Image (spheres, grey):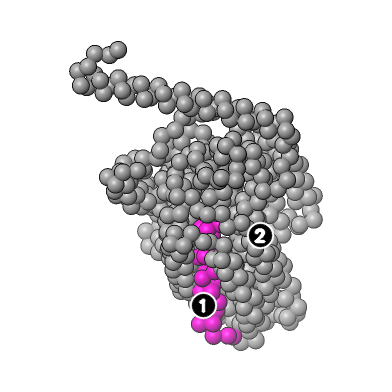
Amino acid sequence: MSAATEVDRRSGIVPMFIGLMTAMLLSALDQTMFATALPTIVGELGGVDLMLWVTTAYILAATIMMPIYGKFGDLVGRKGLLLIAIGIFMAGSVVGALADSMPGLILGRAIQGVGGGGLMVLAQAIIADVIPARERGRYMGVLGSVFALSSVLGPLLGGWFTESIGWQWCLWINVPMGLVAVASVLFFLHPPKFDRAKVVPDVAGMTLLAVATTCLVLATTWGGHEYAWISPMIIVLLAVTVASAVGLVFVERRAKEPVLPIALFRRRNFVLTTIAGLMVGIAMFGTITYMPTYMQMVTGVNATVAGLLIVPLAATQVLTSVVAGRIVTRTGRYKRLLLLGVGIVTVALLLMSTMVYDESLWLTCLYLALLGLGLGMVLQNLVLVVQNTFPLTVVGTATAANNYFRQIGATLGAALVGSVFTGRLTALLSHRLPADAVESSGVDFNSITPELVAGLPDPYHDIVVSSYNDALAPVLGWIAPLTLFAFVLLLFVKEVPLRTTVSRTDQEPDPGKALGEQLDWDGRLESDYSSPLTGEEKVELLEQERADLYERIGVIDAEVSTVELDLRRARGDQPN
């Protein structure tokens, strides 16, 4: 690459990167803003029985669409898909903002999810398209800080909109932000050109993936709330999940363009980091989902202050995301950072399990800061490892699969922790409150709010606050073994050198490999486990690879002839 070309490339990265960050912020900020505004929305639109679907509709649609966006991005290019995803997200925001009923709002949220599922996946894959893995650490670190920023800004903006100009602005704000993202993508994103493949949609795979995801999300969302965990409804949903997942494996093994290729799972680094990401997702979202409410109930602060008390987590996560990214770029090493980060997360969860209701507030904030410190070293580096494991021809599919399983982990974490926490809280209140508590206090303890708790007389106040603390704190310690398991998995990650190019076909040369294996850009000949390929199958794949190579050479020859002809015409020479 010439010096002039390198300068041009770098000069366009910053505005393009701002557009990608804005696109990711759309999705991340939207989810956190609604958590604060939801009680007011239900009060205005009614339909408290549908409240859960405002969140579930978005999560369900976004989770299903992640692998689909990843696969189609690899096949037809990502720029157009990202613009479509942003447009769908903005359209869903408008539908939701104009809604005058809960079903209308839920429809808008579902449309948002269809677009939102592509925002994060495509943004991360586009970074892989234009920035080599060795340099990508610093950019992924900044992208990782977007989520930390949204965890603070979201509740604050949601509360301010709700109390001032109306909750609808939690949705209207996506329109100007979306236009900024669209402009940045249109004018500054110039991904490498490559031959578009003839798209053969994996309809069966997409259908089974949607069914499995839907049933799993519904089972974990409804379990312990709408239905008991051992109710027929939940059992049927889990059974359909398992059956669909098994069917998906069989279908994907035979699909021409599988939406979730089984070949991905032949790479050890992908499997280890994806499972570790799922474990970290369970722990992360199982914790941060309930900490703002914990702050309100136990410490007596209002919603706005509770949001501000989460700032230590966000601040340290932003700091370590950026610093860790720069360290990876400078040294090319990432395994130690992953291990250190997951270790710190485990320690933070164990410390949070020791919380008591009358401890100093600064101590709780210190635990949160420690949690953010660890998360900032982990999240974006897990994606970087996955992207470095595969060639750019499948990096979108791999990135989407990794994000898909992490989103599943987030859903499981919030649902399981919430279910256990609610069950423990109910049991503790029943055990600790006197039999005449409702009559003597005039309070329905099944519908307590932070305001009601603050106004309770001392005996009842201490019982409720201590029960709330004792219901949540031990559960955080119970999920610490999951991150410890992630730590053990990451010990076996092979620290492969980060690539220094963004070629879609070329891998770093390995003298120890045969030429056919060096040219294996789709990874079909490679496995980090024992290869299931027979000799005949390997010969067949190599012959196909040779045919593909000849086809590429023919395309290059045709382009060279066209360029030479244009040059001769420009000089006034007569064509031969």
Q: Mark 2 or 1 closer to N-term?
A: 1
**Residue 373 forms part of the magenta stretch:** yes
Res 29 visible: no
Q: Quadrant of residue 201?
A: top right
The picture quadrant where one finds residue 431 is: bottom right
Q: Is residue 549 visible?
A: yes
- Kindly identify the amino acid type of the residue bearing the numbered disc 1: Cys
Q: Image check: 399 left or right of 430?
A: left
Residue under numbered circle 2: 492
Q: Which residue is more in the foreground, 497 or 174? A: 497
Query: The magenta stretch spans which residues?
Result: 358-383
The residue positioned 72% from the left and 76% from the top of the image is 428
Q: Position of residue 65 (x, y in %)?
A: 56, 42
Identity, as a three-letter code, of the amino acid under mark 2:
Phe
- Using the numbered discs, state the Cα–Cα distance from disc 2 to disc 1 in whole angstroms: 33 Å
Which labelled disc corresponds to residue 365? 1
Q: Nearer the viewer, residue 146 or 574?
A: 574
Residue at point 59%, 74% (across, down): 348
Q: Which mark is residue 226?
A: none
Viewer-side residue, 287 vs 163: 287
Percent across and percent down for residue 117 are 52, 46
How many residues crowd around disc 1 within 10 Å: few (fewer than 14), some, or many (20 or more)? some
Residue 99 spot, x, y in % from top left: 47, 46
Q: Residue at x 69, y 68 (%)?
A: 481
Q: What percent of the width, then of the height, locates residue 98?
A: 43, 46
For the N terminus, give its image quadrant: top left
The image quadrant where one finds the C terminus is top left
Q: Label 2's element?
A: loop
Task: Judge by depth and name the residue closer to the eye, 391 or 104.
Answer: 391
Give the structural element (helix, strand or loop) at label 1.
Answer: helix
Say left or right for 5 vs 326: left
